[in-house]
Amino acid sequence: MILNYMVQYSTSRLDASFAALSDATRRGVLEQLGRADASITDLAEKFDLTLTGMKKHVGVLEQAGLVTTEKVGRVRTCRLGPRRLEEETAWIARYRQLWEARFDELDKVVEELKAKERVHGRKGKK
Amino acid sequence: MDARGRSEPTLMKNRTTLERTSERELVVTRTFNAPARIVFEAWTRPELFKRWWVPKSFGLSLLSCEMDVRVGGTYRLVFSHPASPEPMAFFGRYNEVMPHSRLVWTNDEGGEDGAVTTVTFEERGAETLVVMRDLYPSKEALDAAIASGSTGGFSETFEQLDVLLVNSGASAERP
């Protein structure tokens, strides 16, 4: 979507979660969890990693607040953490800024068209 | 302000609102100080559209902008950004074109998960209220769009960062 292309290159987000996100697998895990909760086993399979390897990635995401996990019986389920909800809010705020910036430009175009119409309107074009 | 004698309109900026109104929908609203036909024109004539759709402050360039604004007509916009290795294309089709009041187009670059955009232009006295709705096929599709804009979609940027971190020895952990 257009905003994401704009936003991803126009805002630098150097914060605590940066390191957690500087890894392709962990970004993939977040995308995956955005679609549905999953167990560590599911994730390990999906990303073709050992259980230990995936646990380590999930641990990093968990520390950054991007993921929470809960153990029920023998299964540890992972879902997006509170941090991700803040990100939705932040995304909405940025998207609004994009529209605001667009509309400020659109105001200028509109004013210009109005001015043109005033001129032409007077030239007897009815 | 100028010497032409005509009073320039005070450019009090109108408010832009954006809200996730449901699991599948985002809504943007804004009022413009002009009749609907003028605002509509700025949304449908490519040479006007390209002047505002890509705000300068976002650092993007519009490489091309083709718009065939009629029912069934297509559009295609190609952007570049200095930080992006590849230009990116956005394209779709106009499903509805009602002069001065309504536009509906698809966003096909995202495949099946793309939103359908509906823009309405409602004239109120000397002003026009513009309401733009992005309706996604599912909650998951909108969540994914948000998620990819928040983190996942940064992938190319992060890939560059990966390289940077490795080169500077700052990466504590590499797979």
Image (spheres, grey):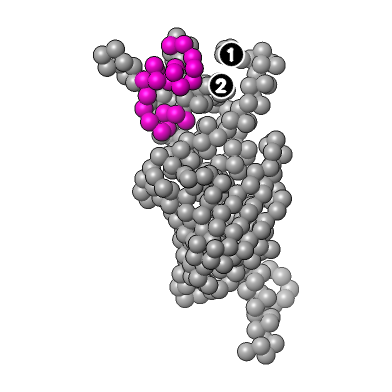
Q: Position of residue B165 (x, y in %)?
A: 65, 19
Residue nearest the viewer, comparing B133 with A122: B133
Specify the quadrant of the image occupied by residue B52.
bottom right
Q: Which residue is mark 2?
A: A23
Callout 1: 10 Å neighbours few (<14), some, many (20+)?
few
Q: Amino acid at mark 2?
A: Asp
Q: Position of residue B90 (x, y in %)?
A: 60, 49
Callouts 1 and 2 close, C-beta under 8 Å: yes
Q: Amino acid at mark 1?
A: Arg
Asked whether A36 falls inside the magenta stretch, the response is: yes
| Percent of width and height locating residue B150 | 51, 35
Discs 1, 2: same chain: no
- Residue for point 66% across, 58% down: B66
Please state the horizontal and vertical placement of residue A55, each as a whole percent of the image: 43, 13
Name the residue that disc number 1 marks: B174
State the residue lying farthest toward the top: A52
State the quadrant of the N terminus of chain A.
top right
Say which residue appears at 52% left-offset and 38% top-offset: B149
Q: Chain of mark 1?
A: B
Q: Which quadrant of the figure contains the C terminus of chain A?
A: bottom right
On screen, residue A34 versus residue B65, left or right, reads left
Magenta-colored span? A31-51
> Chain for mark 2?
A
Q: Residues within 10 Å of mark 2 (few under 14, many from 20)?
A: many
